[in-house]
Image (tube, grey):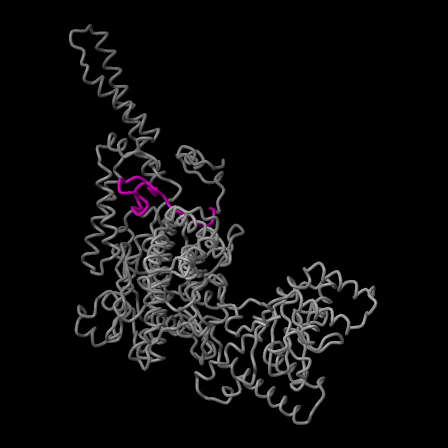
Amino acid sequence: MLLSKKPIEKSLNKAFLKQDLTINQMDIFITNLKILLDEIDQLIFHDQDEENFKTPIINFLKNTYYKDNYYINSSKKYDLIIGNGPKLSDHIAVIIETKRPSNTAEMIDDSVPNAKALHELVHYYMQERLNDNDEIKYLIATNCYKWYIFDAVDFENLFFKNNDFKSNYKAWNSQQTVDSTTKSIYEKIKDFIDNNIDVLEATYFDLKDYKKYINSTNVEDLENLISLYKILSPEHLLKKPFANDSNTLNKEFYNELLYIIGLEEKIKNGKIIIDRKSNKNYGSLIENTINILITRNKLKQIEDIEQYGDNVDEQIFSIALELCITWLNRILFLKLLEGQLIKYHNGDTKYAFLSIDKVKDFDTLDELFFEVFAVKHQDRSPRIKEKYEHIPYLNSSLFEINDLEHQTISIANLKDDLTIPIYSNSVLKNTIKKNELNTLDYLLIFLSSYNFSSDSHAKIQKDNKTIINAAVLGLIFEKINGYRDGSYFTPGFITMYISRQTIRRAVVKKFRENENIDFDSFDDVKNYCKIHHKTEDIRRFNSYINSIKICDPAVGSGHFLVSALNELIAIKSELNILADDGILIDCEVSVDNDELIVINKYNKPYEYYLIDGIKPSNEAQQIQRILFNEKAQLIENCLFGVDINTKSVLICRLRLWIELLKNAYYIPPDYKELETLPNIDINIKCGDSLVSRFNLIDSKQNIKKINGVDTKNLIAKYKKLVVFYKSTTDKDTKQKVEEEIKKLKEKFSDISDPQDPDFKKLREKQSLLNQISTQIPIGFDESYVKAWRENLDKLIKEVSELQNIYDEKQKTIYKNAFEWRFEFPEVLNDDGDYVGFDAVIGNPPYIQLQKAYNDTMKYADLYKTMNYETFDR
């Protein structure tokens, strides 16, 4: 049998591998590791029995990881065990067989892997399984220095599920064999391994290899201990969850952020909703905003104000909340950027542009939004250039004044001198001695109390700050966004699974169609790519994946689209086509725990930073640039979303920008400017994705015949404008293109649906009216003329009524209609025909159609007329 030794980095969950450790965790680990190694040396020096070597290992594991939470001790049957809980009665999860360092005869070794220590572990595993313990996670053999960790899944498949072996073992265990001694079963296990197992995999490490690091003060030396810490932790050995689930809400951060905004959770009709605080803090963001909106009489300037609520109170709260979300989107994006820049520059605090000593008031934030991040370096005023010398231009519509701000207020209009009391459970309670703070100062100090790292890279955190990443922010805003009806979010493992299964089927289909080969599975495609790996092959295969169109029609915070983005990149890596213009890059990219994991050629989490603050390594620059460009290309060409809620659209766009921000890179040769962000916001649109006026298969000829509009030419122009919009980095050009697109969409909205039943009736009556009105009765008797006039008056009235019905329908039912027939030119062919998406993913609507109605039409009836195959009354 061959023993296949895996390094620690290859054994750890990749998402766990890249997680940071706190300095406190590392201090405890190093202290206890030193004690363990010293005690082992003393036991060897005094030539102690093997039994005595258990105690130092127990103490090391207990004091570093398991004390109070998990039972760990020696037992009558086994050398050491770790339980799945704190009690002796809890199921055993880990079995450890210990040997003294000098016991080479029984210890597993490269030259003799089929040793007694392995036989003992197999025996112990079979004992536990026959006693119905299916909670074993790992089995370990160690001589205190060398550690071999076996996954219980392998023991299950190789031994317990082998019917012959299991039958023979059960016969021995029930003393039905001639020799029922332990020695005999070890011999049987040895023979079985020799004859039936070619390769057995184990994680291997030697503590002696780490001695050189534990007394070092060099940070890089200490970081070599991070993986060792993790391999023996409950998160790995007991397969316990670790703090990176993209849907694990950080309640402390969430509750205090709500407090600063001026919101709180309440229960209404059995649902948790978010509303203004009952005990209002008038210095909070939302109360400050509401006060300015009311006193400046801004509501009268808002177009279509009914969309914000049924009454003035609802409207003003919804408008104020949307403004606050817009501003917080920008602030939190900048907080992530700030963390990124500081990391790129090895902790240089001159990049901490959101500190309270630099941001004195709301005007400064407004200045950052619109005079710094929205303006290229060369176009900034001399004062701004000097003040923000190191701050990059971003080219994101996030930093453009939006329509609601144009109609109401900007963040600069907020009062700067207001204060709020410190939150009772504040993260600042041990550092801030005041009872209240200026609101803006409070917000900035609060945010600085967390680590806004867009990604972890297996580092040691000196400040022990809790990490707030993009996934956590997405969940928080999704909860805030669901303030009226309660929020519905999907766990990360579900979005990851659905994206993986759906997109891989789409990939197989693309390869099948383009290569004209009947691939049955993703593995078939994978094997095909292994054979065809010339530069032109890699480029061609990439084009297939780049052509996949994915849509979430109820996009929410964008969770599904982010999962889809990660999966597309991981697929390219798995097919070995993730490349720089056909040249492969030397890293492995995968999705783990709904997170994109990049591992470099040294089996370490990849990271990007400027060496000595000057320039990154060539390898890091290449990987960062490729990941940024891949994400930009996939977001622009492959990912599309629709949501009826404007706040959801804002949040989803933010999530996608953050995904790009994670891989923002400096442009050579001077490495001073970041690569600008593309205009990806146009792919995320607002509208009711279930309601549209046009059938997807309506012919252009029919539309043209009824409306006199050549949709083919309109769509061709629309396509060109969208491509131009996504690529331009000039703000004036972008605004002009936006205006052109807006005018074009107005033309689409003026087009009538030839299949609409009300429109058909109206057209029929109009045609009849035109016909009769031209047949003026000249020379007929008075009774005939009277009848003609009555008929004409009747038709005029009917046409007027039908026109009113049709117009009202456009204003109500079709008010927020989303026209799939035109909205996404990327899924229309050159003739303007709707081709459609390769994959539609997302959550089902959390609503009963029976309860969904308006005064004009029940939605079930509406969906029926729109040719939905499935609907409910």
Image vertical order of residue 191 relative to residue 794, above or below = below
- Quadrant of image for the N terminus: bottom right
Q: Is 620 left, or right, of 59 in this rendering? A: left
Where residue 867 sits, quadrant-wise, is top left
- Residue 525 in the image: x percent, y percent? 44, 53
- Residue 492 in the image: x percent, y percent? 49, 59
Residue farthest to the top? 781
Q: Would residue 469 be counted in the magenta stretch?
A: no
Front residue of 448 and 472 = 472
Image vertical order of residue 599 relative to residue 726, above or below = below
- Residue 333 in the image: x percent, y percent? 35, 66
Q: Main secondary structure of the magenta part?
A: loop
Q: Residue at x 50, y 73 (%)?
A: 9
Front residue of 371 and 27 = 27
Q: Which residues are magenta?
A: 816-845
Residue farthest to the bottom? 46
Residue 276 seen from this side: no
Q: Would residue 838 be counted in the magenta stretch?
A: yes
Q: Residue at x 35, y 60 (%)?
A: 534
Image vertical order of residue 847 relative to residue 79, above or below = above
Front residue of 338 and 588 = 588
Residue 658 seen from this side: yes
